[in-house]
Amino acid sequence: MLERIHTYIVLVCLFGAFVFAENATPKNTTESIKVLELMEYQSSLLENGSLAGYLVSEKLDGVRGIWNGKTLFSRNGKPINAPQCFLQHFPPFGLDGELWIGRGQFEAMLKIINTQCEGEECLCSLWEKVGYYVFDVPECLLDSSAEQNLKKPQVDSKDTPKCTLTQRLSRLAHYLEQTPTSRIHIIPQEHITSQHQLTKHLHKLEALGAEGLVIRLDSAPYERKRTKNALKLKSYHDAECKVVAHNAGKGRLSGMLGSITCEQILKQHDENVPTKTIRFKIGSGFSDMERKNPPPIGTIITYKYRGFTASGIPRFATFYRIYTAP
């Protein structure tokens, strides 16, 4: 009997130790963050078929940064190791924007984020030229002093405040008046009323090296999903696909890569429509060095294209770069 009691006590202790060890083990807390996502621009998606009521801004080719009032995250939910000298005057409320150092500098910005640097002084030097360019303030919560300078937010049927984009950005502008910092910038928003003006503005910025434009409905709330109220416009489109085969080159490219075969899962805007997987070849956009050392099979790449063929294959697909998630 005593042996049974002793055995029972030992088992209970072992089980208790196991449970404690399980609960004490640090778990991976990185989770995907639901954020605003852009749809490709089509005039048919505009409210009432008009640009009236929309705001237009430059689409920055930076690294997405989500500030939750305490920590800076990537869009995948991974904490970004920004130095305190960069974050010290950030507001106690959430922001959505881009970490950016200039047009055409995406890879350089990504390198800064991924560089391992010991000590605050090293990080501050590394981040010296980085700016946080904000395009939205997700939460519509106006403090009392800011409310005096803004129109009263609309209220929807559930009594939830519904601020316009202008009002949300004004909240940040008011904060920056009280707490100036050279690190945070509000991306300028412009009113453009015609398709002709929109195209002209796009070509003007692209000539300066810009990626494209973002067109947003001012009256729409911040939506944590892909929405027709937030659109992107470029002279070209880009997307990601997975390299599944290397195809040998001929003639001048003999002994090197001729093209890659890529596989892509096409997401549908309608959740009730099943996804579609396509395969296609990409043979242009590679340098001779990249042809001698092509992206390994299984690599995710970003490619540019101009619309689709009748069979749903990207038209004029061109290699852009190897995709790296921040």
Image (tube, grey):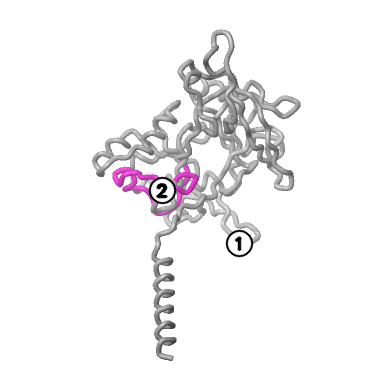
Predominant SS along the magenta part:
loop
Indicate the quadrant containing the C terminus: top left, top right, bottom left or bottom right. top left
Residue 228 lies in quadrant: top right
Where is residue 238 drawn, in percent x and y? 58, 29
Q: Residue furthest bottom?
A: 1
Asked if the stretch drawn in magenta spans residue 292, the answer is: no
In the rendered structure, which segment of residues is drawn in magenta?
Answer: 74-97
The answer to whether mark 2 and mark 1 are in CB contact below 8 A is no
Q: Out of 111 and 43, give the one closest to the viewer.
A: 111
Please identify the residue farthest to the right as the structure is shown: 310
Q: How far apart are marks 2 and 1 (CA)?
A: 33 Å
Residue at 62%, 38% (x, y): give it: 39
Q: Say if residue 198 shows up in the picture.
A: no
Compare residues 298 and 121 and report the one nearer the observer.
298
Residue 8 in picture, x, y percent from top left: 44, 83
Residue bearing mark 2: 79
301 shown above or below 153: above
Give the mark nearest the N terminus, 2 or 1.
2
Name which residue lies at 59% across and 27% down: 245
Between 248 and 69, the residue placed more toward the observer is: 248
Query: Residue 146 in the image: x percent, y percent?
Result: 44, 52
Disc assigned to residue 252: none
In-image side of 266 versus 127 (left or right): right
Q: Is mark 2 on a helix, strand or loop?
A: loop
Label 1 residue SS: loop
